[in-house]
Amino acid sequence: MKTGYSTWGMPKVPLDTAIPHLARTGYAGVEITVIPGYTSELSTLTPDVRRHIRDLFTEHGLEMPAIAAHTSLLETDRERHAANMDRLRASVDLAVELTLGDTPPCIDTTPGARPEDWKEVRNRLVEETGALIEYAAERGVVIAMEPHVGCCLCTVERTLWLLEQLPSPYLKLNFDISHFDVAGVSTQESVAALAPHTVHTHVKDQRGKVPDFEFLVPGEGTFDYVEYLKAMQTAGYDGYITVEVSVMVQRRPDYDPLASADLAYRTLSAAFEKAGMSP
């Protein structure tokens, strides 16, 4: 397994600053975020900027395991839904263009809608996800669906159901264990069920349980990363363990995105060492 960082936690930090800092810190890979509000928002990535991003990653010896394109597939407004799907397809095209090795970065997204909407939207989710997979598969790109607290895809059972409806090597999971931890699902249970279907991960720290919970920077809470890493290894996962700093943390008036990346790296490195693993 390797340590990665998502620029989700760096919405206002230019990649020219973020990439060198994350490389110096010790991360092996970086997931770039291309949603609105970020310095690397998709519509700003001209051909010259895309070439520059590739050069930045190459210069600093970093891999790009994923692109964070989190966009609802279940928007009810017709025009907004069409724009969302266009953006997801354009993110797939970006993944092809930014491929640094043999495998394009996967596209991380969440499905949208609310937990209580599940029965109403699940068939539509299959339809929309299936169409996106078809587009991605033609380009060799994996869609990494992220189960997420507060959205319709919020349980192990629902996640496995979706995967059963769309048995494709181009649909896998972006497995963020924090969303299961705050829901009271044990590490062993969620990892055993979901790690075999996982192409990419996110980790945070967290305290409390739904509905009274808080996401934290790794190292600020008590999540047992050693247990988690050992469970992921036992399940056969050998990809990226990627830090994602929640918007909850970003709202703090004293939030420092670079210092948070440093703390998270120290936390994961110590956990890898204690687990007897080499990241």
Image: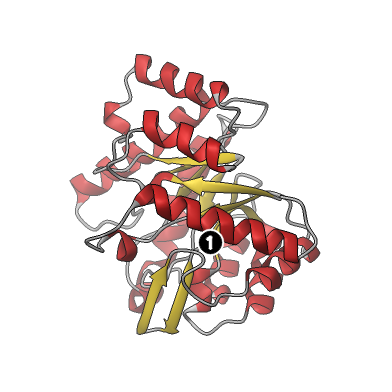
Q: Is residue 2 visible?
A: yes
Q: Give the labeled residue for mark 1.
A: 203
- The colour scheme of the drawn protein is secondary structure
Quadrant of the image occupied by residue 11: top left
Percent position of residue 4, x then y: 57, 47
Front residue (pair 96, 234): 234
Left or right: 61 as drawn, with respect to 48 = right
Left or right: where 229 falls relative to 4: right
Amino acid type of the residue that numbered disc 1 sits on in the rendered structure? Val
Q: Is residue 91 placed above or below 10 in the rendered structure? A: above
Residue 71 can be seen, yes or no: no
Using the image, determine if residue 68 lies above or below residue 120: above
Q: Residue at x 74, y 66 (%)?
A: 274
Q: Secondary structure at mark 1?
A: loop
Q: Position of residue 126 (x, y in %)?
A: 47, 58
State the residue at coordinates (41%, 52%). 259
Q: x, y (%) of residue 5?
A: 51, 47
Q: Is residue 93 left or right of residue 195?
A: left
Q: Position of residue 31 (x, y in %)?
A: 49, 42
Q: Please determine whether, in this image, residue 141 is positioned above or below residue 54.
A: below
Q: Quadrant of residue 112?
A: bottom left
